[in-house]
Amino acid sequence: MGEQERMVEAILFASSEPVSVNELNSRMPHGSDAAEALVHLRKRYEGRGVHLVRVGDAWALRTAPDLGFLMQKETVETRKLSRAAIETLAIVAYHQPVTRAEIEEIRGVSVSRGTVDQLLELEWIRFGRRRMTPGRPVTYVVTEEFLDHFGLENARDLPGLKELREAGLLESRPPMGPLAAGESEPDDDEGVPDTDQGEMFE
């Protein structure tokens, strides 16, 4: 098992993306048990400068959260999201799998194609299974990249509404009213970040 731990550690260290248990087993010698090796390796990294963390169904080595200040010299390019994109992303995260029609029903406005394309380009959402309903509409779900960016093991770890309000990340304002039939959200909203909510998904 000690040798298997070393192999798992080597693979995760060299990988720029989280690695699933199945992928680890496929790279290791026949008969290896990557899942058990991960359990031992995770305990070994407790209290160290690097932690072994679970990201969805995959695993990765990440800097300990309390040592993040040491990385401040790294250049980070932040990209502001429009209010429409933030609201759409939040709906997908909390209601996945969700269709475009359901997103529009919750937001009260039509979702422009640019909003969804932006989130797909960031690889924070992806296409899910089609609904077994008339028209077979496609659904959207959040990705492992989304979970990794926000340090979440899975979508169930998302903060609740009370926590969001206490953190100042959710406005206590009434929802927007629906637009007239056939009307969609203005294109201007796509490129203009919302100064109050934009910090949530930088």
Image (cartoon, rainbow, N blue to C red):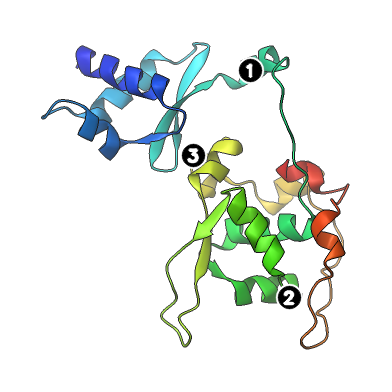
Residue 169 versus residue 39 in the image, above or below: below
Q: Which residue is mark 2?
A: 110
Residue type marked 1: Asp
Q: Quadrant of the C terminus?
A: top right
The residue drawn where x is 52% and y is 57% is 126
Name the element at disc 1: helix
Q: Which one is in front, 13 or 188?
A: 188
Q: Which residue is mark 1?
A: 66
Q: Which one is in front, 121 or 80?
A: 121
Q: Quadrant of the N terminus?
A: top left
Q: In x, y percent, where is residue 20?
A: 34, 37
Residue 150 versus residue 112 in the image, above or below: above
First-in-chain label (3 vs 1): 1
The residue drawn where x is 47% and y is 88% is 134
Name the element at disc 3: loop
Question: Residue 153: which disc?
Answer: 3
